[in-house]
Amino acid sequence: MTENTEDEAVEAIAGIIVRDVLQEEYDDLVEGYLDEILTASRRIMQLPAYAAVGKLFEKRLDDAITSRDARIEKLEAALREIEDHVGMRVEFAEPKRTEAQNRLLWPLLTALSVQMKWHGLTLSPEDWKDVMTAGLKREARMVPNMDGNGFVALGMRTSTMTKAEFGELIELIHAFAAREGVTLEREKAA
C-alpha cells in the first residue's frame, strides 16, 4: 500500500469516526427517550383511531435503531480493515482525565498538605494523592519496600483515570476537606 493510499485510508476512517462521534451525541439523546417513546406509541396503538399511526411510528423507530446498529457495524468493519491493511489499531475507550482536572488536583492536595496533619504527620501533596486515590478505590494495598524495613502503598495512577474517575477523585477530596475543616482555594476566593 502506498503512502498516499495509507493517508487516504486514515483520512477516510477519521471522517467516519468524527461523524460517528457527532452522531453518538444525538443518538444518546434519542436513546434516553426510547422507553418513553415506545410506551407512548403502544398507548397510541391501543386507541382504535390511531392504531395505524402508532404502528407506523413504531416501525420508523425500529428502522432508526437498525440504522444505528448498521452504522456501528460499518465502523467496526472499517476499523478492522485499517488494522489489517495499514497496521494501525483504533481503540474506543472512555476519555482520559483532562488537563483542567489535573490542574485542579494539585492545589487541592496542597491545601490538605498545608492545613492539616494526618495521624500526627505532615504529608506532602504527593502523599495526599496516594491517600486519596487509595480512598477512591476503597482499598489499601501495601507491599514491603526493597530493604524490608518498611512498606510502600500502592495507589491508583491518576494519569490512567478516566474523566469520570478523576471527577470522583475531586469530589472525594472536596468531601474529605469539608469533613476535616480544610478550606480549599475556591472556597477562599468566595
Image (tube, rainbow, N blue to C red):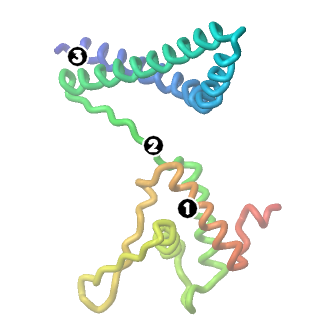
Which residue does the numbered mark 3 point to in the structure image? Answer: 3
Which residue corresponds to mark 1?
A: 169
Camera-side mark, 3 or 2: 2
Foreground pick, 22 / 51: 51
Q: CA distance from mark 3 to mark 1?
A: 44 Å
**Residue lying at the far front of the rendered structure:** 48
Query: The residue under label 2 is which amino acid type?
Result: Glu
Q: How far is mark 2 from mark 1, CA to CA? A: 16 Å
Q: Residue sitting at 46 percent across and 47 percent down?
A: 96
Of marks 3 and 1, which one's residue comes earlier in the chain? 3
In the rendering, which numbered label is found on residue 57? none
Which amino acid, mark 3? Glu
Of the image marks 2 and 1, the number of the one nearer the N terminus: 2
Q: Residues within 10 Å of mark 1 (few under 14, many from 20)?
A: many
Residue type, label 1: Leu
Residue assigned mark 2: 94
Q: Is residue 188 above or below residue 18?
A: below
Would you call the spot at circle 3 few (<14 residues within 10 Å), some (14-19), or many (20 or more)?
Answer: few
> Residue placed at 37% from the left, 72% from the top?
154
Secondary structure category for the residue under label 3: helix
Closer mark to the observer between disc 3 and disc 1: 1
